[in-house]
Image (cartoon, grey):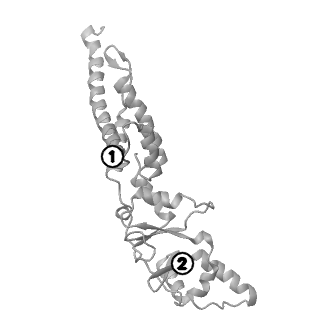
Amino acid sequence: MTPSSQEQELPSRTNAADYQSRAIPFLAAFNDIETHLRITLDAKRSDSFWWMVDRAVDKHLLSRRQGEVLKDYGNLRNAISHGRYHDGEPIAEPHPVVVEDIEMLRGILMDPPIALSILQPTDVVSLTPSSAISEALHVIRKQGYAQIPVYEDNKFVQLLTTNTISRWVARDLADNNTLDARTIGDVLAMVDKVDEAVFLARETTAQEAVDALISPDKNGRLPYAAIVTETGNRNQRPLRIITSSDLAVLIDSLSME
C-alpha cells in the first residue's frame, strides 16, 4: 500500500523538530563559549572568534585540537545563523555528537579540571645534598620513584633522577671500578639538562599541566617532570610531582569523547 501524503510529511516534521532541539543547545553552548573567551581574554568587539580561540590556545585554556574543533564549530554556527534555507529549513544542522562535544568543551573551558584533583595523591620524598646516596637508592627501590627533589635550607637545588644515578654509576666505575660518591651532592655533579623540572602552582589546570610537560624549551628539550607547589615557587614545599606517566590521565580528563 502506498503511504498517504500525510504519512510522507511526518519525517520532515520530525527532522525539523529534531533540528530545533539540537540547534538550540548548540547555539547556547557556542554563545557561552564566545562570551567566556571575550571576557577572559578582555577581547575587543572587533576581535574575531578565531582570534580568541588562538589566544585561548596560547594561554593554555584549550588544546590545539580543541581550538581547531571550535573553529569548525564557528563555521557551523555561521551556517546555522546566517546560512541559506531549503523548504523553510536551514541547510546546516548540528549532529548529535557535535552538540555533545561543544557542551563538553564549554564545561572544560568554563570550569577547567585542576590537575591535582584529577591525579591520585602521592607523597613526595625530598632529600638534601648531604643525604647519603644510599637513602635515595632506598626510596627508589622501596617506593618506585624515578625522581627525588633535592632541597638545601628550604631552597630547591636539583631533581635527582634515576637517569642521573645511572650516569653516576657508569662514570664513577669507569676510573677505578669503584663507586666513590657517598652523598647526593656528589651524584648531582652528573645532572644533565634533560633532568630539569618545571614548577606549577596548586591550582594549575589539567590543560596547563599537559602543555608544561609537552612543550620543549628554546633548546628543544622537554622537562623531565613538573613539581607542584602552592604558588609555583621553586622553593616552596613540593605537593606532587607530575611526570609523563600522568599524561594519559590528564589528557583523558580533557577528552571530548
Marks 1 & 2, CB-CB < 8 Å contact: no
Image quarter of residue 8: top left
- Whether residue 173 sits left or right of residue 103 in the image: it is right
Up-down relation of residue 26 to residue 83 (above or below):
below
Task: Please tell me whether mark 1 sits on a helix, a strand or a loop.
Answer: helix
> What amino acid type is highlighted by mark number 1?
Ile
In the picture provided, is 102 more to the left or to the right than 66? left
**Where's residue 142, x and y in %?**
48, 82
The one of 241 and 71 positioned closer to us in this rendering:
71
Vertical order, 220 against 135 (above or below): above
Q: Most extreme residue toward the right, as rendered?
A: 175
Crowd rating for badge 2 (residues with CA inside 10 Å; few <14, some 14–19, many 20+): some
Q: Which residue is mark 2?
A: 158
Label of residue 80 in the image: none
Mark 1–mark 2 Cα distance, whole angstroms, equals 39 Å
Dividing the picture into quarters, in which one does residue 2 lie?
top left
Confirm whether residue 4 shows in the render.
Answer: no
Label 1: which residue?
39
Which residue appears farthest toward the left when viewing the image? 6
Q: Amino acid at mark 2?
A: Gln
